[in-house]
Amino acid sequence: MTQRKLYLGPLTDNRRWDRVAIRPDDVIVATPPKSGTTWMQTIIALLLSGNPEVDPQLAQNMPWVDIRLRAVDDLAKGLDARSDRRSMKSHTPMDGLPVHDQAQYICVFRHPLDVHFSFRNHTRIVPMPVFKAWYPEDDPNGATFRHFLDGGPEGFDGDLAPLAHILRHYQAAKALADRPNVHLFHYADMLRDLPGAVARVARIMGITHPDDLMAQLVQAATFDNMKAHADRYVPAARKGAFASESDFFHRGTCGQWHDVLTQAEVAAYDTMMNAELTQADRVWLEFGSAGAP
């Protein structure tokens, strides 16, 4: 990819990737926020280590390259110094990333409405002023959902998880899905068949473990285990980044919007989805390979 889009928000800057020399065996997790990023990173950490009790220290060992809270010089030096196999995280769509011919890119998607409600919870446990205007705690008039529908895919809005940004992620990843090193996963598929998802990631990474160990790694990657050991699995664990580390793993379910959104809000969402996606793409983005229930 020769021409990369610019994604510059209040928290992130995809130009930081210019400082990272991609290696052929790198594994890059590129997802919209709250779509299964930490879950996929944990699976990768478990497979790399072969240890179901691993403390992955995701923020240090699998850094979020885009975020501007860490000096890019320090980030680049740390990555350059690594002699082990590296994995990194990004919330930049694939059209804003450097795409290496051999490095593996894993893109995870989730029903956009589940992303939205998970992000709502996220803003309650992350004390960042940037979230306050878009995600007010007292919202009787539904401003939060209007922001979700009206926000743009780039610029300031992009870091606040609007629908347009999620759609850009999906469209950019799908445009590259014919490449052998770009892989699309869906949160709902991972819920339905976690052993199958872990096995697929292992194949992508060229990693094998005995069956009994793989079963232990799968158990370690379950939602219940990750929530029970949140101080091990959340990004920046034990650093005070979240008001509640356990609440970082909120529900891990699908369909959180039912009985919450009004009919008018759902209709407005449907209109935007139908305008941007084919019916087949919409069904996959919302429900994964099994389709609508």
Image (cartoon, helix red, strand yellow):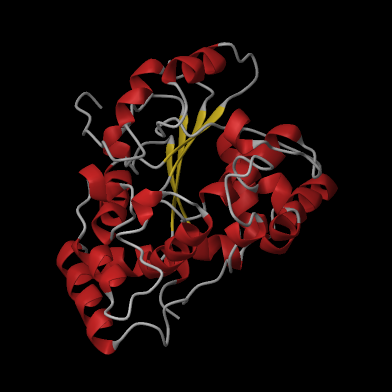
Q: Residue furthest left?
A: 275
Q: Where, by quadrant of the figure, is residue 264 drawn?
A: bottom left
Which residue is rendered at x = 38% and y = 16% of the image?
Answer: 19
Q: Quadrant of the N terminus?
A: top left
Q: Where, by quadrant of the figure, is residue 263 drawn?
A: bottom left
Question: Residue 133 at what x, y percent from top left?
Answer: 30, 59
Q: Is residue 107 left or right of residue 283?
A: right
Q: Is residue 147 left or right of residue 108?
A: left
Q: Where, by quadrant of the figure, is residue 46 drawn?
A: top right
Which residue is rendered at x = 28% and y = 48% of the image?
Answer: 158
Question: Residue 24 at what x, y percent from top left?
Answer: 49, 20
Residue 112 visible in the picture: yes
Q: Is residue 254 above or below residue 93?
A: below
Q: Is residue 14 above or below residue 164?
A: above
Nearest the camera: 139 or 15?
139
Q: Is residue 274 left or right of residue 81?
A: left
Q: Is residue 46 above or below residue 74?
A: below
Question: Residue 273 at what x, y percent from top left?
Answer: 23, 68
Nearest the camera: 8 or 286?
8
Which residue is rendered at x = 64% and y = 54% of the image?
Answer: 245
Nearest the camera: 190 or 137?
137
Q: Quadrant of the C terminus?
A: bottom left
Residue 278 visible in the picture: no
Question: Residue 134 at what x, y percent from top left?
Answer: 30, 61
How many tags in the picture?
A: 0
Q: Is residue 160 above or below residue 50?
A: below
